[in-house]
Image (cartoon, rainbow, N blue to C red):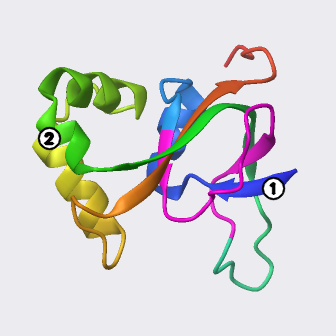
Protein backbone atom coordinates (compact mmCIF):
# COMPACT_ATOMS: atom_id res chain seq x y z
CA UNK A 1 0.00 0.00 0.00
CA UNK A 2 1.38 3.40 -1.01
CA UNK A 3 1.40 6.40 1.29
CA UNK A 4 -0.18 9.65 0.08
CA UNK A 5 0.27 12.94 1.90
CA UNK A 6 -2.78 14.98 2.87
CA UNK A 7 -0.82 17.70 4.67
CA UNK A 8 -3.01 20.48 3.25
CA UNK A 9 -6.27 18.60 3.89
CA UNK A 10 -5.58 16.56 7.02
CA UNK A 11 -8.74 17.76 8.77
CA UNK A 12 -10.91 16.92 5.76
CA UNK A 13 -9.55 13.35 5.82
CA UNK A 14 -10.02 13.06 9.59
CA UNK A 15 -13.59 14.37 9.25
CA UNK A 16 -14.22 12.22 6.16
CA UNK A 17 -15.54 15.19 4.20
CA UNK A 18 -13.06 14.65 1.35
CA UNK A 19 -13.70 11.99 -1.30
CA UNK A 20 -11.65 13.42 -4.20
CA UNK A 21 -8.05 14.57 -4.45
CA UNK A 22 -6.12 16.08 -7.32
CA UNK A 23 -2.46 15.21 -7.82
CA UNK A 24 0.44 15.66 -10.16
CA UNK A 25 1.53 12.20 -11.23
CA UNK A 26 -0.22 9.18 -9.69
CA UNK A 27 -1.23 8.15 -13.22
CA UNK A 28 -0.81 4.42 -12.61
CA UNK A 29 -3.46 4.16 -9.88
CA UNK A 30 -6.41 1.92 -10.68
CA UNK A 31 -9.83 1.46 -9.11
CA UNK A 32 -9.48 -0.90 -6.16
CA UNK A 33 -5.95 0.22 -5.24
CA UNK A 34 -5.51 1.04 -1.57
CA UNK A 35 -3.75 4.12 -0.25
CA UNK A 36 -2.61 5.03 3.25
CA UNK A 37 -3.67 8.64 3.80
CA UNK A 38 -0.90 10.29 5.84
CA UNK A 39 -0.50 13.70 7.38
CA UNK A 40 2.99 14.06 5.88
CA UNK A 41 5.10 11.55 3.94
CA UNK A 42 8.21 13.41 2.83
CA UNK A 43 10.49 15.94 4.46
CA UNK A 44 10.17 14.37 7.89
CA UNK A 45 12.59 15.70 10.47
CA UNK A 46 14.82 13.37 12.44
CA UNK A 47 12.67 11.39 14.84
CA UNK A 48 9.39 12.18 13.05
CA UNK A 49 7.33 9.22 11.91
CA UNK A 50 4.68 8.91 9.23
CA UNK A 51 1.25 9.46 10.78
CA UNK A 52 -1.39 7.41 8.98
CA UNK A 53 -4.84 8.97 9.14
CA UNK A 54 -7.04 6.59 7.15
CA UNK A 55 -7.00 3.78 4.63
CA UNK A 56 -8.55 4.67 1.29
CA UNK A 57 -9.73 2.60 -1.67
CA UNK A 58 -9.52 4.19 -5.12
CA UNK A 59 -12.89 4.38 -6.89
CA UNK A 60 -11.85 6.16 -10.09
CA UNK A 61 -8.83 7.85 -11.66
CA UNK A 62 -8.72 10.18 -14.64
CA UNK A 63 -6.68 12.98 -16.14
CA UNK A 64 -8.29 16.38 -16.47
CA UNK A 65 -7.38 20.04 -16.47
CA UNK A 66 -8.24 22.23 -13.49
CA UNK A 67 -9.92 24.64 -15.88
CA UNK A 68 -12.71 22.09 -16.32
CA UNK A 69 -13.91 23.22 -12.88
CA UNK A 70 -13.97 26.83 -14.12
CA UNK A 71 -15.62 26.02 -17.46
CA UNK A 72 -18.50 24.09 -15.85
CA UNK A 73 -19.57 25.98 -12.70
CA UNK A 74 -21.88 23.27 -11.37
CA UNK A 75 -19.16 20.64 -11.78
CA UNK A 76 -16.67 22.99 -10.12
CA UNK A 77 -18.91 23.62 -7.09
CA UNK A 78 -19.57 19.89 -6.70
CA UNK A 79 -15.85 19.17 -6.89
CA UNK A 80 -15.08 21.81 -4.22
CA UNK A 81 -17.45 19.89 -1.90
CA UNK A 82 -15.85 16.54 -2.90
CA UNK A 83 -12.41 18.04 -2.17
CA UNK A 84 -13.57 18.98 1.34
CA UNK A 85 -13.98 22.73 0.70
CA UNK A 86 -17.76 23.33 0.59
CA UNK A 87 -17.40 27.03 1.44
CA UNK A 88 -14.67 27.77 -1.13
CA UNK A 89 -15.50 29.25 -4.52
CA UNK A 90 -14.34 27.42 -7.62
CA UNK A 91 -12.02 30.31 -8.50
CA UNK A 92 -10.53 30.25 -5.00
CA UNK A 93 -10.02 26.46 -5.10
CA UNK A 94 -8.27 26.55 -8.49
CA UNK A 95 -6.11 29.46 -7.27
CA UNK A 96 -5.31 27.57 -4.03
CA UNK A 97 -4.34 24.43 -5.97
CA UNK A 98 -2.13 26.35 -8.40
CA UNK A 99 -0.38 28.29 -5.60
CA UNK A 100 0.28 25.12 -3.58
CA UNK A 101 1.75 23.20 -6.56
CA UNK A 102 4.71 24.84 -8.27
CA UNK A 103 4.35 25.22 -12.03
CA UNK A 104 0.65 24.30 -12.09
CA UNK A 105 -1.84 26.44 -14.01
CA UNK A 106 -5.56 25.96 -14.75
CA UNK A 107 -4.65 24.36 -18.11
CA UNK A 108 -2.22 21.86 -16.53
CA UNK A 109 -3.42 18.23 -16.78
CA UNK A 110 -3.68 16.71 -13.31
CA UNK A 111 -4.86 13.37 -11.94
CA UNK A 112 -8.31 13.38 -10.32
CA UNK A 113 -8.60 10.53 -7.81
CA UNK A 114 -11.94 9.59 -6.27
CA UNK A 115 -11.77 7.37 -3.19
CA UNK A 116 -13.76 5.84 -0.36
CA UNK A 117 -12.79 5.16 3.23
CA UNK A 118 -12.07 1.51 4.01
CA UNK A 119 -12.47 1.30 7.75
CA UNK A 120 -15.57 2.32 9.67
CA UNK A 121 -15.64 5.76 11.26
CA UNK A 122 -14.50 5.68 14.88
CA UNK A 123 -16.10 7.79 17.56
CA UNK A 124 -14.02 10.71 18.76
Chain part drawn in magenta: 21-41
Is 76 magenta? The answer is no
Q: Are marks 1 and 2 in contact (CB under 8 Å)?
A: no
User: Which residue is situated farthest in the right direction here?
Assistant: 1
> Which residue is located at x 16 percent, y 30 percent?
72
The relative height of residue 113 versus residue 66 in the rendered view (above or below) is above
- Quickly name the residue at label 2: 70
Q: Determine the main secondary structure of the stretch shown in magenta.
A: loop
Q: Quadrant of the C terminus?
A: top right
Label 1 neighbour load within 10 Å: few <14, some 14-19, many 20+: few
Q: Is residue 22 left or right of residue 60?
A: left
Is 30 magenta? The answer is yes
Q: Secondary structure at mark 1?
A: strand
Label 2 neighbour load within 10 Å: few <14, some 14-19, many 20+: some
User: Which residue is situated farthest in the bottom direction here?
Assistant: 46
The relative height of residue 2 versus residue 120 in the rendered view (above or below) is below
Comparing 110 with 80, the one in front is 110
Mark with earlier residue (1, 2): 1
Task: Residue 66 in the image: state x and y as whole percent.
Answer: 28, 50
Task: Residue 36 in the image: state x and y as whole percent.
Answer: 77, 46
> Which residue is located at x 71 percent, y 55 percent?
28
Q: Secondary structure at mark 2?
A: helix
Task: Residue 11 in the image: state x and y as whole percent.
Answer: 50, 38
Task: Residue 44 in the image: state x and y as whole percent.
Answer: 69, 78
The image quarter containing residue 34 is top right
- Quickly name the residue at label 1: 2
In this view, the mark in front (1 or 2): 2
The relative height of residue 17 versus residue 2 in the rendered view (above or below) is above
Q: Is residue 107 left or right of residue 29?
A: left
Amino acid sequence: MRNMSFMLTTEQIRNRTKTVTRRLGWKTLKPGDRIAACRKCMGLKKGEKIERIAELRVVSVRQERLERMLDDGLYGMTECVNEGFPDMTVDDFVDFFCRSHKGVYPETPITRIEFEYCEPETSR
